Image (cartoon, rainbow, N blue to C red):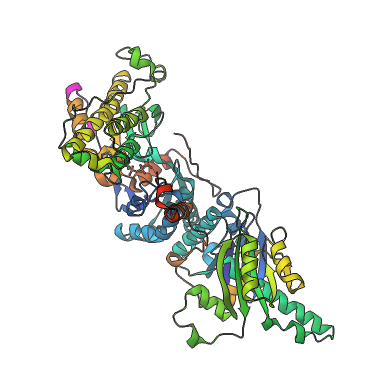
Amino acid sequence: MLILALDTTTRPGSAALWHRDRLVEVREGDPDRTHAERLPADLVALLTTHAHTLADVDIFAVVSGPGGFTGLRVGIATIQGLALVGHRPVFAASTLLLLALAAKDKGIEASAGQEGKGEDTRGQHDSSECFVGAWMHAARREVFTALYKPVDEVQAPELAGLGAEDIIAARVGLVTLDDAAVDAPEAVAARWHARHPSARLSVMGDAVSDFADPLRARFGNAVSLCSPPPLAGVLARLAAALPDVTVSPHAIVPTYVRRPDAELARDRALSRPRSDREWVGG
Amino acid sequence: MKILGIESSCDETAAAVVEERGDAARPWQARSNVIASQVAIHRAWGGVVPELASRQHLRDICGVAERALEDGRVGWRDIDALAVTQGPGLVGSLLVGLSFAKSAAASLGVPLVPVHHLAGHIESLVLEHGELPYPASVLVVSGGHTSLYFVPEPGRYHLVGRTRDDAAGEAYDKVAKLLGLGYPGGPIIDRLATQGNEHAIAFPVARLTHRDRNPAPEVLLPEGFEKALQYRTDFSFSGLKTAVMRYVKSRDAGPGARSAFSDHEIADICASFQRVVIEALLNRTFDAARWYNARSIGIAGGVSANSRLRAVATARGEQVGLPVFVPSLKLATDNAAMIAAAGLRRFHQGVTAPLSLNAHANLSL
Ligand SMILES: Nc1ncnc2c1ncn2[C@@H]1O[C@H](COP(=O)(O)OP(=O)(O)OP(=O)(O)O)[C@@H](O)[C@H]1O
């Protein structure tokens, strides 16, 4: 099975190729050129390096957001064009879920490494006790976030009626504790802490380096922060594990999280007392 | 040759299959022309909201493209090239169609032809009527554009005038909003104006070009159209919009003024406003035709749907012996058949795009 995965939710973004049972290559993009300029040439180049063509691809995978709106749409429209013409299914997962998954996998690796050293720390670092979160730049001094709880894999009957994203989360053993959100870092940290004051957190995302002080302030040593790997690789691996959870290219649902400014402005205007209201939409 | 056109420059997601007929006089035929309009979404806002438009394009693009193939009774493998609007337009909107078209072309291994949206509007006339008698004086008039082109021969376009502020369609939309008539304003004002007296109110005509005060020679050719191009003839509609606003205010009516006026008065305002717009548009289009010795007049774009504009243009054409061409409604507003047609034109001029093609909000023609 050949899977071509694309992430355009950050400036450089990334592309990855999965063949049979392994991740063949993950490539980061050139942050000095826009996604529109680089696509679909970057994808074709990645395939060519490994002697494949677009026609060989069995599943096209795309990160559905959140992230920069324009990059996000360029990525999805690119994958839509490839999948529609090639009559291939699409695997789509949100940036937040991929970050949480990467954080979870990293935690498992870490505890496996420690076991290897003969130090049994599972008592304190039981991965089921450690929540995993996503913490991404959202511009405007805000972050895109979500918080999950790792669980044992959820069984099929419990998945009935769930959307694709929730099915994917459940199948990889993640249950949502705090929904995808965009907010000031302080606000999210406060909310997470209010709900889970004694939790340990493993949080991943590109905003951990410069927007995570509120998390440290609330959770102290109980939070571990890590920078994300290129997400196309995480996505390709996930698509390979769940090749049955694909959708048609028409049905990709972008995960914007942030609502359009026009709607936000309208809601603000409507919530003001009537006398202060300006004409909206003018 | 069959080409798939993709258009997403503003608030319509469109795809169409156009094929060559092998007849030089009537070169193209649309096999399909699918348009998903977002008017219902933007109506609530009184105008196009770019972020909402981009989001909707992404929802619609796959279905619209598939439907265009289905209606045209062709499969992907029958498509020999893709044409896509590169600009001008809303960049977020343009990028959806452009990214989709680039990857579809890459997947099919066929050429991609970048098209200027206004070239599409101009070629909508040829798609509908066959090659025009050239040279032609072609006015493209829509919600986003009011541009006058001299077209000396097929596929060559020289800009000879454009609006310095609002586009004519935009003026229709803004005046309709001011009067509380609804969105989009063009068709509503068109309808109401038929009931009104177009001389009821003397709204001003903008005089802003050199030639408005110093008439140009009657015929500038045979000195060549390059010389004639100096006599650019621009448009302006914001003064007119302001005049309507002042008129409405003089009656103590705020935005959405409908209730302050009787139906009869509203119809008079619409008719009087429309008379000034149409005069401005047609004076310049016919002046340009005279200067450049044009053999035909074309009017394309959303506002060309205006019934009064069509009637007055045709009558004036008859007076001076110039045929006037306008597209049918389906080809007048934004559509992809015109983009496909312009794409075929450019393809035969040797223009194709690399996969690095980017969208340009202010692309010039
Ligand atoms: N009968 C009419 N009379 C006057 N104006 C009209 C009429 N019908 C439509 N219009 C105007 O045409 C415009 C829509 O044109 P069009 O569909 O070409 O879309 P647009 O987004 O403005 O196009 P473009 O991207 O080419 O600028 C609107 O401003 C609308 O009010």
- Which of the pair B295/A246 is nearer the observer? A246
B217 shown above or below B189: above
- Which of the pair A67/A132 is nearer the observer? A132
- Residue B126, image x, y percentages: 29, 38
- Residue A91, image x, y percentages: 52, 70
- Which of the pair A28/A192 is nearer the observer? A192
- Quarter residue A176 falls in: bottom right
- Residue B226, image x, y percentages: 42, 19
Q: Magenta span covers which residues?
A: B319-326
Quadrant of the drawing holding the C terminus of chain A: top left
The residue lying at 38 percent from left, 19 percent from top is: B209
Quadrant of the drawing holding the N terminus of chain A: bottom right
The residue lying at 16 percent from left, 31 percent from top is: B197
User: Is residue B94 a member of the stretch shown in magenta?
Assistant: no
Rendering quadrant holding ligand 1? top left
Q: Is residue A17 left or right of residue A160?
A: right
- Quarter residue B271 falls in: top left
B129 shown above or below B41: above
- Residue B51, image x, y percentages: 46, 52
- Quarter residue A135 falls in: bottom right
Q: Is residue A2 visible?
A: yes
